[in-house]
Image (tube, rainbow, N blue to C red):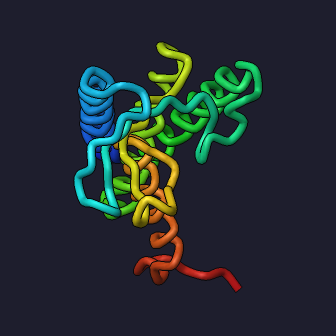
Amino acid sequence: MPNASSRFGRLGLLVLSVLVLVIDQVSKAHFEGSLQMFQQIVVIPDYFSWTLAYNTGAAFSFLADSGGWQRWLFALIAVVVSAVLVVWLKRLGRDDTWLAIALALVLGGALGNLYDRIALGHVIDFILVHWQNRWYFPAFNFADSAITVGAIMLALDMFKSKKTGETVND
């Protein structure tokens, strides 16, 4: 008979996803309440500022000017990806901690931006990285950061050596 830990996989790490979601939403509410649109508060001169921006598109404002249909497309994609991530977490074993953390980070970030899309029609961004006011990386938020860190962890996980106990069929 399977024990509870194998039956639920690594769903316990959904706590991390919820933490990412809460931090994301609290930080977005703070900056939306504190800043006017595109107002910059310099944190590190020539490199880093807080600023308020709305993104109706996907990463790097992809499809931002497409008339509104993209809101629902990106929401649908986020729902499907989130469901896949939850199933994947459930199927992970006890030794898959690195992978589970990566999936939980991506899930929390996806849910944070999904909430914005559905409730507001746009994603709230507030982190601006730039180089001496000449080069600007598109504004982003805590959810985007969690997704990025999780994706990097997923990529690194692919390069890890085979786990002990796995066999290769000839």
Residue drawn where x is 43% and y is 34% of the image = 38
Please state if 4 lies on the left or on the right of 55 as rendered. left
Residue drawn where x is 72% and y is 36% of the image = 63
Q: Position of residue 70 (x, y in %)?
A: 71, 26
| Corner quadrant of residue 29 | top left
Please state if 75 lies on the left or on the right of 119 as rendered. right
**Which quarter of the figure is the C terminus placed in?**
bottom right
- Extreme top residue here? 119
Please state if 140 lies on the left or on the right of 95 as rendered. right
Q: Position of residue 37 (x, y in %)?
A: 42, 27
Q: Nearer the viewer, residue 66 or 3?
A: 66
Q: Position of residue 130 (x, y in %)?
A: 42, 59
Image height of 106 relative to 108, above or below? below
Q: Nearer the viewer, residue 71 or 103?
A: 71
- Extreme front residue here? 133
Please state if 158 lies on the left or on the right of 31 as rendered. right
**Which quarter of the figure is the N terminus placed in?**
top left
Q: Position of residue 149 (x, y in %)?
A: 40, 58
Residue 87 can be seen, yes or no: yes
Q: Nearer the viewer, residue 167 or 159?
A: 159
Numbered disc total: 0
Residue 7 can be seen, yes or no: no
| Corner quadrant of residue 81 | top right
Image height of 80 relative to 49, above or below? above
Residue drawn where x is 41% and y is 40% of the image = 109
